[in-house]
Image: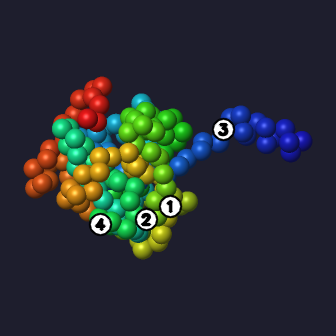
Amino acid sequence: MLLGIHYIICVVFPVVLMSRVFVYGTLKKGQPNFMMLDAANGRAEFLARARTVDRYPLVIATKYNIPFLLNVPGKGQRVHGEIYSVDQQMMHFLDRFEGCPEMYQRTTVQLEVQDGDGEGENTLKPGSLVETFVYSTTTYQPEWLQKPTYENYDSKGDHGLEFVSGEGRSPE
């Protein structure tokens, strides 16, 4: 009898696998691609603002002024961004959007939580450490390591390198 009830509950209320993703560039609130975190692409719930535990070079590169988190721990700055809980549909969308695995690779990163809005099981306490997915890159031009690094990306920042959006562009 209990097995039958479990089956009914699983069919009526299917398990939704959620993953945590750290965004540091154009997908943050107020940035040019934030609208990409739209319900039509899957589920994304803001959990907290955070910064990387390790330093990383966050650079702006290519003729499109794209923010890249170079997967070179120990160089650069502690990068600020936002943590989202996303479902598998949104994760697949983000993989396609980020050109994973060609342009960016989905890796994990340790973060220090700054503040958050989560409740219940999604609560992240300020000062706590969490591991999430992040889209960083190991495929970059060597000269990118000589570029200025940023701790907090803003498309309209005083760096003067406003993001250039466009469909179907290559990172060249």
The label nearer to you, 3 versus 2, is 2
- Mark 4 residue type: Gln
Give the x, y percent position of residue 125.
45, 69
**Dots 3 and 4: beta carbons under 8 Å?**
no
Q: Are marks 1 and 2 in contact (CB under 8 Å)?
A: yes
| Label 3 residue SS | loop
> Residue tagged by mark 4?
77
Crowd tier of the residue under label 3, counting other residues whose Cα lies within 10 Å: few below 14, some 14–19, many 20 or above: few
Which badge, 4 or 2, comes first in the chain's sequence?
4
Q: Is residue 60 left or right of residue 5?
A: left
As drawn, 49 above or below 9 = below
Tell me which label, 1 or 3, sits earlier in the chain. Answer: 3
Structural distance between the alpha carbons of marks 3 and 4: 41 Å
**Which residue is identified by label 1?**
131
Residues at marks 1 and 4, CA–CA distance in whole angstroms: 18 Å
Amino acid on which disc 3 is placed:
Pro
Please tell me how crowded label 2 is: few (under 14), some (14-19), or many (20+) other residues with Cα within 10 Å: many
The mark found on residue 153 in the picture is none
Viewer-nearest residue: 116 or 51? 51
Q: Name the residue nearer the viewer: 101 or 49.
A: 101
Residue at image position (43%, 65%) is 111
Quadrant occupied by the C terminus: top left
**Closer to the camera in the image, 40 or 144:** 144
- On the image, the x and y values in percent for residue 105 come to 44, 45
